[in-house]
Image: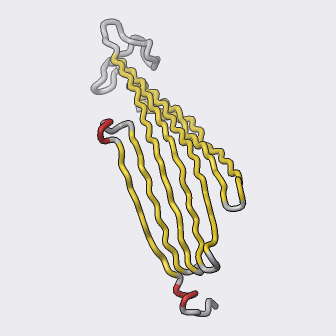
Amino acid sequence: LETNKNTYNRDRVTGSVFLTYEFAKNLSGTGKVMLDQYSQLTTSNQAQGTNGAADGSYLENVRRYSETNTEFILSYKTDIGKDFKLSLNAGGNQMRRITTVIQGFIPALELPNFYNLSNLKTGSVFQGANNYQEQRIGSVLGFGQLSYKDYIFIDFSGRNDWASVLPVQNNSFFYPAISGSIVLNDILNIDKS
């Protein structure tokens, strides 16, 4: 059992950068770039003489993953009279995700206890596979809030996504939302202590 091992190694980097710029007193823009990336190596080996693998075996799987999100939001806030406040936000997002997988398997070892894809026993057949997958989602979005005296709130949003994994004629989907809330303590003048 000591010579039949599985390994798992992953190197991962995540991070984000954002910048906000105020164009005017009530108007600002925020740009963001977010990254999630990793490289992963998994192996599995069986020594010669192992039950079900008399000549030993070795499997190696390399996976690389990268996701990048780029987003820009334009924000506008204003007071409407003395009782109402309005905030509006609009922007877009672009997501790109790439996954690659390369796998190799040798069903029999030429040299004992040497676990490498080059150690294929003469007469055996190497088994390999690779896969590349890329996905993109482009989005347009908007959201906002209308408030009355800071105790009645209506929030609303809408977003439309276009996904590369869906058929072109049906790759767009829209999801709106609206909600409301009331701060009863302020309306009923209930003491907060």
Quarter of the image where one finds residue 113? top left
For this orientation, the residue located farthest to the front is 81
Q: Nearer the viewer, residue 179 or 82?
A: 82
Give the mark count. Answer: 0
| Residue 33 at least partly seen | yes
Quarter of the image where one finds residue 137? top left
Q: Quadrant of the C terminus?
A: bottom right
Residue 8 in the image, given as x and y percentages of width and height:
48, 34
For this orientation, the residue located farthest to the left is 52
Up-down: is 28 above or below 107? below
Up-down: is 187 above or below 95? below
Residue 47 in the image, given as x and y percentages of width and height:
39, 23
Residue 108 in the image, given as x and y percentages of width and height:
34, 16
| Residue 2 at least partly seen | no
Q: Residue at x 53, y 63 (%)?
A: 144
- Colouring style: secondary structure
Up-down: is 77 above or below 38? below
Q: Residue at x 49, y 68 (%)?
A: 155
Q: Residue at x 41, y 46 (%)?
A: 161
Q: Residue at x 54, y 54 (%)?
A: 90
Residue 96 in the image, given as x and y percentages of width and height:
48, 37
Q: Nearer the viewer, residue 83 or 133?
A: 83
Q: Nearer the viewer, residue 88 or 31?
A: 88
Q: Quadrant of the N terminus?
A: top left
Horizontally, residue 104 falls left or right of residue 71, namely: left
